[in-house]
Amino acid sequence: MTFNLLNLTNTKPEKQIVSLLQEVKDPEIPVLNVLDMGIVSAVRVTKEDLVEIDIIPTYSGCPAMKEIKDDIFKKVSPIFKNLTIKLVTSPPWTTDRISKEGLQKLKDYGIAPPLGKDQGEFSYMDIKIACPRCESKNTVLQSAFGSTACKSMHKCHDCLEPFEHFKCHI
Amino acid sequence: MTSDASLLKFSLRLADNLFVLSHRLSELTSSNPTLEEDIAVANISLDLLGQARHVYSYCGETLENKNKSEDDYAYLRDEREFYNVKLVEQPNTDFAYVMARQLFFDTFQILFYESLIKSPNKDLSSIAEKGLKEIKYHYRHSSNWVIRLGDGTEESHQRMQEAVDELFTYTGELFSTDEVEVDLIKQGVIEDPNSFKSLWEKRVQEVLKEATIKTPSKETFMAFGGKNGVHTEYLGKILAEMQCLHRAFPGAEW
């Protein structure tokens, strides 16, 4: 299921906010924006031009959330001065919130995108993930935990490059 | 006890478990057995800290009417005001202890979160729903290590058996209930943790069996008190280290 905020927002201010959000990059993976990541769960504009944006953490302890909140504020508040950004815990973030474009951007950046829901949550520990550089499946899991909470570490036996995999969260 | 007071104490018990255990794991940073383990343990610690923060935030914003911040809970409470179970404050004696402690906790926390997800309290159920996804990874990690070390060399087996034997005495407290739980169970906010105790016992026993480790007897003396602020000698030392900087420079900011 992909979440397309543009389908939900038909009014001019909300469309404007969405295009501003597309310029706010994930601090850890700067090729993705916060909408690609599915971090923005809601955008509300009230009659009085009060703007509320809800963001959800990818992992409970994601240390980038403060920076993301600040970056969204810096981008949106010059135009929408009455802005509140709230970090909420519901709905829980899952990897199927990452947009199709986001998945491709991850791969191009060298991070193996998350496996689908249908393949089960721990499948990356049991099946071989395709190398994002050379596509080979002759890879091995080095650690279930990577440089950030959301990634695992793998190595490709063909091109000999290490790579990270975005862990599936369902 | 008023129902609000019960909810606050229940939430603090949950947050303090996560927070103290997170801190214990963070103490190991840069000294775990391998580089990959160092990253793994740090990640697990961070997950727990994140979950703790969400619960403290709920306590401060909602239950205490914005009168408290996360930092207030973390840095300005004394030992007797922390309500974590004694298990999570036990020392990182060796890697076997760390993984045995983690096994006992992770097995419990999965069941605890699966139960809490059903709560009509949306704040707690959403934190549980998110936390469950992370705890499942932790459980996979700790159970794999207990098996690998238990069914390992003579030395690793001995150390794991010792760790399991010593820490088992702190597992009873995970399921203890008092007027706080009784109150919340009556209101339909939570389920009785004893309803999943035998499942916990079964799962732990299965892992220990595969690890060729003897499960300690059910007659083992169980230690209680942490949930009401009566702790082992270790919590005081943890807090002294954790809180001293914040208390030495009140109001200091980056």
Image: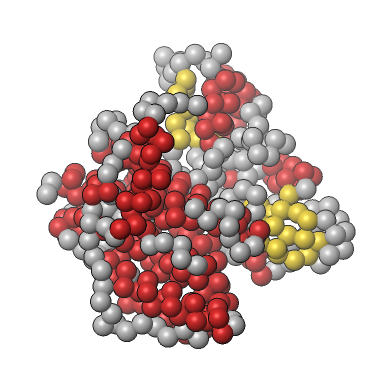
Residue closest to the eye, A49 or B192: B192
Q: Position of residue B125 (x, y in %)?
A: 36, 51
Q: Is residue A20 visible?
A: yes
Instruction: Name the residue rendered at 38%, 41% in the picture.
Output: B243
The x and y percentages for residue B236 are 32, 51
Residue B40 versus residue B28: which sits nearer the camera?
A: B28
In the figure, A37 relative to A75: above or below? below
Question: Residue at image x 25%, y 36%?
Answer: B64
Quadrant in the rendering for residue B55: top left
How many labels, in total?
A: 0
At a point 44% along the width and 31% down the height, the residue shown is: A86
Q: Which residue is most to the left?
A: B1
Q: Is residue B172 left or right of residue A155?
A: left
Answer with the quarter of the image where residue B199 lies. Answer: bottom left
Q: Residue A26 in the image: x percent, y percent?
A: 64, 35
Q: Is residue A119 visible?
A: no
Colour scheme in use: secondary structure
Q: What residue appears at the point 42 percent right and 26 percent down from the top-left corner?
A: B252
Up-down: is B230 above or below B246? below
Tell me: B164 left or right of B174.
right
Q: Examine the rendered structure and indicate whether residue B151 appears above or below residue A119.
A: below
Where's residue B127, x and y in %?
40, 49
**Dividing the picture into quarters, in which one does residue A114 lie?**
bottom right
- Between B248 and A138, which is closer to the camera in this rendering? B248
